[in-house]
Amino acid sequence: LINSGVAPDDITYRREVDMRYVGQGHEIRVPLANGELSAAGVPTLKADFQRVYQELYERLGPPVNIEVLNWRVIAAGPKPVVKLEITSENEGAATTIAATQKGTRPAYFPETAGFVDTPIYDRYLMTPGMQFTGPAIIEERESTVIVGPASDCHIDEHYNLVIAMAGAEVTVTNRDDLENPKTTMAGDSHLADAHTNGDTHGA
């Protein structure tokens, strides 16, 4: 923690033990009071175990011995303030959404009851603030995102694709950075159910 930048005065310590009745196949965590460990503290530790056990199961266990499996010390510090800064080797390469387009492809959408000549965009050239209206196909190495007809899409400050359709707004692609994108789908299923001519693309 100190090597991570946490001040020594901000570090807190908590002691716990894993305990159970002899013969049981599972144990429970019991808080351990500060101070020196000695035989004199065994009755207190036993009472603490029985208290926690009764709180969990609303009864005490069988009249058998109690055993300790693990002794644990947990050190913790305050949650750091993390500022997300995303950079891209392609940042600035495209200043308009039109500059990210790399072609078109016939794609079928239920809303149009037929194939539509659909723009294909390069995900890695998109920068925050860009926006456009579907239909659209957005390609990246790991996935393909389909934006349905009349759906609005914009790129937020964290490079997420945010798609708004039928009065709802959902974030469909969460990108920690441009080199390791992650894709999660939300909203109506037809966002990821557009069939291209000869290929089937799902996000």
Image (spheres, rainbow, N blue to C red):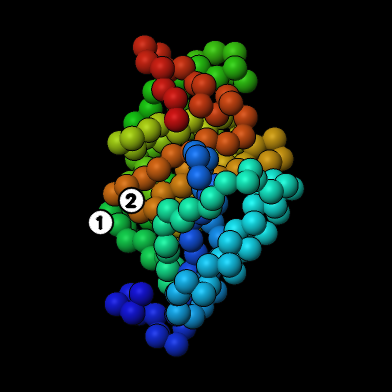
Circle 1: element type = loop
Report the residue marked by disc 1.
89
- Against 166, residue 98 (above or below) is below
Q: Which marked residue is nearer to the observer: mark 2 or mark 1?
A: 2
Specify whether residue 44 is in view: yes
Residue 178 got which mark?
2
Residue for point 47% across, 43% down: 173
Along the polypeptide, which appears first: circle 2 or circle 1?
A: 1
Distance from Cα at disc 2 to Cα at disc 1: 9 Å
Does 203 sit left or right of 186 as displayed? left
- Against 174, residue 42 (above or below) is below
Q: Tell me residue 56's x, y (percent).
A: 67, 50
* Contact, mark 2 vs mark 1 (Cβ under 8 Å): yes
107 or 22, which lies in front? Answer: 22
Q: Amino acid at mark 1?
A: Glu
Residue for point 33% across, 35% down: 142
34 or 106, which lies in front? Answer: 34
Q: Tell me residue 16's x, y (percent).
A: 49, 64
Q: Tell me residue 19's x, y (percent).
A: 51, 54
